[in-house]
Amino acid sequence: MLDQESKSSNSKGIDELTKNERDRIRAEMRYAHLVAQEARPQTPPKTIIEKFLGFLSNGFILLIVGSLITSVLVPEFQRSYDQRKQQLSLMQDCLTQFLTYSNSIWSEYYTVLPLTQKLEIEQDEYLEYIKKISEIKLKRYNAFAKVIALSVVFEGNNDSVSTGISKALKQYAINLNSASTQIDRWLTGLYCTPTERALSPCASYDPDFDAYHEHLKIKQTVVNLGNTGADNVAAMIVNQINHL
Amino acid sequence: MIKNSDYQNILFITLLILSINANANGINPPRPSGSETVHASCQYRDTDTTIKVERVRVRSSVSKTALYISFAGLPQKLVQLSDIDLIRMLQPEPDANGYVYVELHLNSPSYIGNGYVLISFGDQEFELIGFTKDRTRISFPITRCKEIDFKQSGRSDNLPYLLPSPAAH
């Protein structure tokens, strides 16, 4: 009952205001609004960057940019990182195989070393040494095949260092083959060239063959190749790994 | 924390140090006695022809690669064939002890002059054995030669020749 009475009295009060009173109230309200606006501190105009940041801070734009980053840039960076990691691993494998390859000439050299104290060898001994050397050679061929296959990883970097590695590997292989051939020839000379025996077991031989003198030549070749040659190539590979 | 690149640097530096300080140098085995390759030219006393013998050695009870030689008033000593350049027989036959008087050209010790070479012992006549050009075995008594010219394989004929020993004059 009371609520109904107060509502009816309020509506009656507003209806009772004159036009002048209403205008005055309106003018006061406008004035109050103007005063409030004037009292508020002035904000400087936004710069282009602020406008751009404001644009970026938009939720939809953020969603689009985030999607682009996760779908394009992150996989690209990941791919690049994985590729470098794989390259590094292949280069390290190449170095390991190269060291196996280059050390094989030492094995070959030291295998035949005891024969320097002999003037000539019989067929059984010759075949025994041929077998030992063949095993070393097979391991070397295996290592070399791996080195060549893995060295492709250097060719991807089309710079002078990579080209240098390929060239150095080829040159080293030629020198190593040459040293190995010298050892073969020496072993053959020791078997074929008769000194005490009545005849040579071979169809031909070098009458000037001097086992000791020839071995000194082999030593010179192998020491040069095993030290300087191998170190140069290994250093080039390591250098390339460091630059990756 | 050690990074991957640090390991690479360590490896590189190790290799570099190894290449500087730990170069392998191989092994220098000793030369076996009498292993030098010697060729000889023997001028036959009877026919005056010369035969070339490759990889020559001596068949004797003393040594396969050396001869007993006495020169310059010194006691006899074994001289390797590779150290002899020339033996020119000045007597056709050895004396009762097996020595023959010869003109000697030695490379080591350096000597040119006369001396004695043992070419027989008891009933055994010392022989030169080796191979002919066609790779067949050959052997003949040293007494059959009037002059024997030895050449070590690889030695140049133009080496500065020996200084004459005072005993040669």
Image: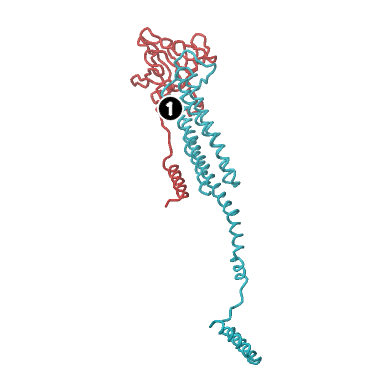
From the viewer's side, name the closer residue of A102 and A34.
A34
A90 or A64: nearer the viewer: A64
| Residue, disc 1 | A113
Q: Residues within 10 Å of mark 1 (few under 14, many from 20)?
A: some
The chain that appears red in the image is: B
Residue at 52% across, 19% down: A205
Q: Secondary structure at mark 1?
A: helix
Q: Amino acid at mark 1?
A: Leu
Q: Residue at x 50, y 48 (%)?
A: A242
Q: Indicate whether A106 appears above or below A65.
A: above
B71 displayed left or right of B4? left
Q: Quadrant of residue A70?
A: bottom right
Coordinates of residue B54 in the picture (x, y in percent): 50, 17
Task: State the cyan chain.
Answer: A
Could you say which is closer to the camera, residue B93 or residue A209?
A: A209
Q: Along the line of sight, which residue is nearer the eye, A168 or B95?
A: A168
